[in-house]
C-alpha cells in the first residue's frame, strides 16, 4: 500500500509547522489599517490573504476518507510520485500568478482578524494532528489540483504548506508596498 514513510510524515509535519510560523510572523504587528487596506486595485489585502489561506486549509481527512477520487494508471502513478519537489516549489514561486478557485476566494467570511486567524489555526492544528496519526495510504489517494494536475494525498499535504508560504510571502510584499 501507499502509506507514507516515517521520513515523509516528519517532513510533512515540519513543512506544515514551518509555514504556520512564517504566516504568523508575516502578520505579526499588522495594524488595523494594514489588515484591510489593499495595496492597489485588483490586489488582495492582508485580511483577504488570511481568509483565503484559512478557506483552503480544509481538513485533509475529508477528501481521503472516501478513498481515491482519481484512478491513475500505474505509469501515471510513477510520474505523479515524482511531483513531490514540484509541489513543494511551484506554489511558493510568486512570479507565477494564478486565479484562486471560486470556492476559496475571499468574500468576507470572517468578521474579525481574530476569527480569521483562529480559523486558520484550528484547521492547521487539525491537519497536523491528522498527518501525525493517519494510517491512510496517502500515496494511493489521488485528486486533481487546479494548478499541479493529479497529485497524491501526501502531495496535497505538501501543497497546504506551500500554499501558506506563498501567501505569507504575499503578505510581506503587501506590507512593503503599504
Image (cartoon, helix red, strand yellow):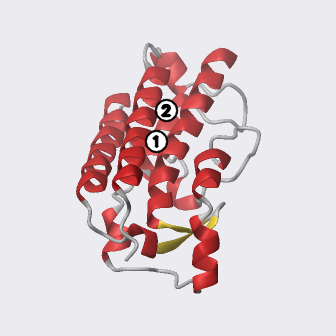
State the residue position of label 1: 51
Helix, strand or loop for disc 1: helix
Bin the neighbour count of mark 2 within 10 Å (Cα to Cα): few under 14, some 14-19, many 20 and up: many
Mark 1–mark 2 CB contact (< 8 Å): yes
Q: Does residue 126 appear to the left or right of 78 in the view shown?
A: left
Q: Residue at x 24, y 50 (%)?
A: 129
Residue 155 drawn at (x, y percent)? 50, 59
Task: Look at the image and tell me in which quarter the N terminus lies.
Answer: bottom left
Residue 111 position by quadrant:
top left
* Image disc number at residue 47: 2
Q: CA distance from mark 1 to mark 2?
A: 6 Å
Against 143, residue 31 (above or below) is above
* Image disc number at residue 43: none
**Numbered marks: total:** 2
- Whether residue 108 is visible to the viewer of this picture, yes or no, is no
Residue 178 drawn at (x, y percent)? 65, 16
Q: Nearer the viewer, residue 106 or 74?
A: 74
Q: Residue at x 63, y 79 (%)?
A: 76
Residue 97 drawn at (x, y percent)? 74, 46
Against 176, residue 39 (above or below) is below
Q: Residue at x 50, y 48 (%)?
A: 107
Amino acid at each position: 500500500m501507499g502509506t507514507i514513510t516515517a521520513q515523509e510524515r516528519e517532513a510533512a509535519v515540519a513543512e506544515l509547522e514551518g509555514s504556520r510560523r512564517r504566516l504568523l510572523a508575516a502578520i505579526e504587528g499588522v495594524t488595523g489599517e494594514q489588515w484591510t487596506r489593499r495595496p492597489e486595485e485588483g490586489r488582495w489585502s492582508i485580511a483577504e490573504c488570511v481568509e483565503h489561506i484559512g478557506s483552503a486549509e480544509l481538513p485533509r481527512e475529508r477528501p481521503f476518507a472516501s478513498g481515491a477520487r482519481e484512478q491513475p494508471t500505474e505509469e501515471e502513478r510513477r510520474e505523479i510520485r515524482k511531483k513531490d519537489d514540484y509541489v513543494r516549489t511551484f506554489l511558493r514561486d510568486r512570479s507565477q500568478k494564478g486565479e484562486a478557485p471560486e470556492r476559496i476566494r475571499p468574500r468576507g467570511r470572517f468578521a474579525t482578524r481574530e476569527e480569521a486567524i483562529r480559523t486558520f489555526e484550528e484547521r492547521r492544528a487539525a491537519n497536523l494532528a491528522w498527518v501525525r496519526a493517519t494510517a491512510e495510504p496517502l500515496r494511493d489517494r489521488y485528486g486533481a489540483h487546479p494548478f499541479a494536475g493529479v497529485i497524491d494525498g501526501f502531495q496535497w499535504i505538501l501543497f497546504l504548506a506551500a500554499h501558506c508560504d506563498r501567501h505569507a510571502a504575499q503578505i510581506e510584499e503587501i506590507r512593503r508596498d503599504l
